[in-house]
Image (cartoon, helix red, strand yellow):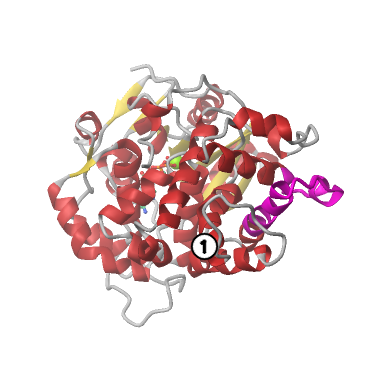
Amino acid sequence: MNLPVSSNSRAVVTELQQAGYEAYIVGGAIRDLLLDRTPKDFDIGCSATPEQVRAVFGRRRTRIIGKRFRLTHVTNKGELFEVSTFRKAPREGGRGEQDVRDGEDVPENLIVSDNDFGTSVEDAWRRDFTVNALFYDPVSGELYDHTGMGLEDIKSHTVRAIGEPALRFEEDPVRMLRALKLVGQFDFTLESATENALFASLELLKHASPSRLALELEKIFGSCYGDRHFKAFHDYGLLEFFLPFLEEAWGTPPMERALKLLYERNCRLDEGRYRNSISLAMACMALPFVEQKLGLEPGAPIPPRGALRAAEEVVESIFLPLHMIVRLNLSAEKIIAQQSFFDQGKLTRELLDSHTYPNSRELKIIRSAAAGIDPEQTDREWPLPPSGSERNSGPRRKRPPRKRRDRASAPA
Ligand code: ATP
Ligand code: MG
């Protein structure tokens, strides 16, 4: 089989193999390629320990990271790869760290440390879903489906937990969120035992580590499918345990508008019109609730007074339970508050010099587009950020734009 993996990832695998280790491209990238999607990164799995990976690539090109799950970042020609050592399923009682949500009754089988190295076959079986457990050797072109179901499940668009679903969700409740991301993003269906276990285990999400949930949320906002992910979380009753503020608001006009703005941002990201910015995505979600707090009609001009305070309160209500990175919160709040400059038609030095100007300008464009105004018109109206700034460093038109209908169903 010949899968179009990036040449840099192939080179990293080749170097590991030449040093005598077993190495493959693993996980989401192989799933995405088999689904004819462009992977956002290529993860590598190998028999080398983090220290051995470091010995292969040298100190300058590597960084060993993680505690619960140690792995190595390897750079190749400016591209970063996560290289992890094959794991086996953690031993019973592999607990140790206290990175779980403050809690009384921590589930018996919750895993908080996952650093027992193993073989490639063991590594496939400790993964979350069959569709995420395929290994590809880009040198020989061989594809390995150790669970025996991965390829079939990709073909039939099925999310199937590896092993006993209820136990897998108890070990790591974040897997429920990951299952529903596949539902939202690819229109996959949960296999029935996996679905039953998920419904029965939703409350366990309370015990998940907030920092890991925050990491997943960052990935959701860093993708162009966030609106679809949130819908899947709501449909399956998970949103309540993940972002309760949004669940409570579900179906209300500000929530509908939040999904619409996020959808617009996702389309523009997918079309290569603007770079990927997590804080911009957060601002899209929060803005309609700021409008509500300020007593404004949806899309009405944002007044200069009170906007920042309202943005702070809203961003905190939505994201604080997850300890989103403070820097992201602050940027999202500023991007919202700066809408007042655009809405008053005031181009100040302060606005232009601000490091959030590119994102604020983009939110203004998104708001216009959501109001039915041609985004190109707003784009022409406001000065471009200076070259070399955020706007121009993004992935502009890396791939040909796809039709919006193919990407996502537009919210009503
Ligand atoms: P994405 O496109 O969002 O990156 P992904 O499946 O590649 O999707 P990653 O978080 O990059 O997600 O994880 C890489 C791989 O590691 C997964 O495909 C899966 O095989 C494995 N994995 C990730 N998280 C878990 C988990 N909580 N439990 C078991 N395996 C996991
Ligand atoms: Mg990945």
Residue at (45, 74) in percent of width and height:
98
Instruction: Measuring from the top left, give residue 174's x and y in whole percent.
Output: 36, 58
Q: Is residue 136 above or below residue 244?
A: above
Q: Position of residue 125 (x, y in %)?
A: 27, 46
Is 336 within the magenta?
A: yes
Which residue is identified by label 1?
292
Look at 68% across and 42% down and name the residue there: 361
Q: Position of residue 310 (x, y in %)?
A: 61, 67
Residue 345: within the magenta? yes
Taking depth in this image into account, of 408 and 172 the one nearest to the observer is 408
Please, what secondary structure does the residue beneath circle 1 have?
helix
- Please indicate whether residue 153 sits to the left or right of residue 106 in the image: left
Residue 90: where, in percent of width, then height? 33, 59
Left or right: 241 with respect to 324? left
**Residue 3: quarter of image:** top left
Q: Residues within 10 Å of mark 1 (few under 14, many from 20)?
A: some
Q: Which residues are magenta?
A: 331-357
- Ligand 2: quadrant of the figure: top left
